Image: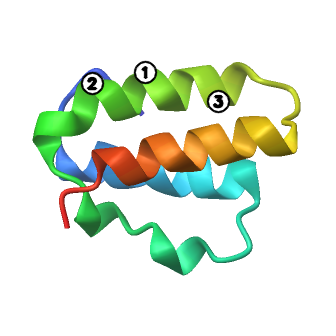
């Protein structure tokens, strides 16, 4: 998948990938439709960083989830 293309399909792919990688218990709180394409580059940067991390501390997870929450538009 070419994530350099800004579209809703790629945005959904990245959000779902983040949820899966973080193994969120309440992943229903983070839905791809809650994010707009105007935040695509920020979400892509977060996605790239998270996908490179082999593991996460609780603090890491909290920070990533807070960042995702700050990028929400709804």
Image coordinates of residue 19 in percent, x first then y, are 61, 57
Name the residue that disc number 3 marks.
50
Q: Quadrant of residue 44?
A: top left
Q: Residues within 10 Å of mark 2 (few under 14, many from 20)?
A: some
**In the displayed structure image, the side of residue 73 where residue 65 appears, left or right:** right
Image coordinates of residue 33 in percent, x first then y, are 25, 67
Q: Are marks 2 and 1 in contact (CB under 8 Å)?
A: yes
Name the residue that disc number 1 marks.
45
Q: Residues within 10 Å of mark 1 (few under 14, many from 20)?
A: few
User: Which sits earlier in the primary sequence, circle 3 or circle 1?
Assistant: 1
- Quarter of the rendering occupied by the C terminus: bottom left
Mark 3 lies on a secondary structure that is helix
Image coordinates of residue 30 in percent, x first then y, are 45, 67
Distance from disc 2 to disc 1, alpha carbons, whole Å, reads 6 Å
Distance from disc 3 to disc 1, alpha carbons, whole Å, reads 9 Å
**In the displayed structure image, the side of residue 44 where residue 18 appears, left or right:** right
Q: Are marks 3 and 1 in contact (CB under 8 Å)?
A: no
**In the displayed structure image, the side of residue 55 where residue 3 appears, left or right:** left
Q: Quadrant of residue 37?
A: top left
Identified at 41% across, 53% down, the residue is 69
- Quarter of the rendering occupied by the N terminus: top left
Mark 1 lies on a secondary structure that is helix
Image coordinates of residue 63 in percent, x first then y, are 62, 38
Looking at this view, is 12 or 38 the one in front? 38
Name the residue that disc number 2 marks.
41
Above or below: residue 68 compared with residue 5? below
């Amino acid at each position: 998948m070419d994530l350099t293309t800004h579209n809703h399909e790629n945005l959904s792919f990245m959000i779902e990938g983040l949820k899966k990688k973080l193994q969120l218990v309440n992943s229903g709180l983070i839905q791809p439709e809650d994010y707009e394409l105007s935040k695509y580059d920020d979400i892509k940067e977060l996605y790239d960083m998270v996908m490179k991390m082999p593991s996460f501390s609780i603090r890491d997870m909290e920070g990533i989830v807070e960042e995702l929450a700050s990028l929400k538009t709804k």
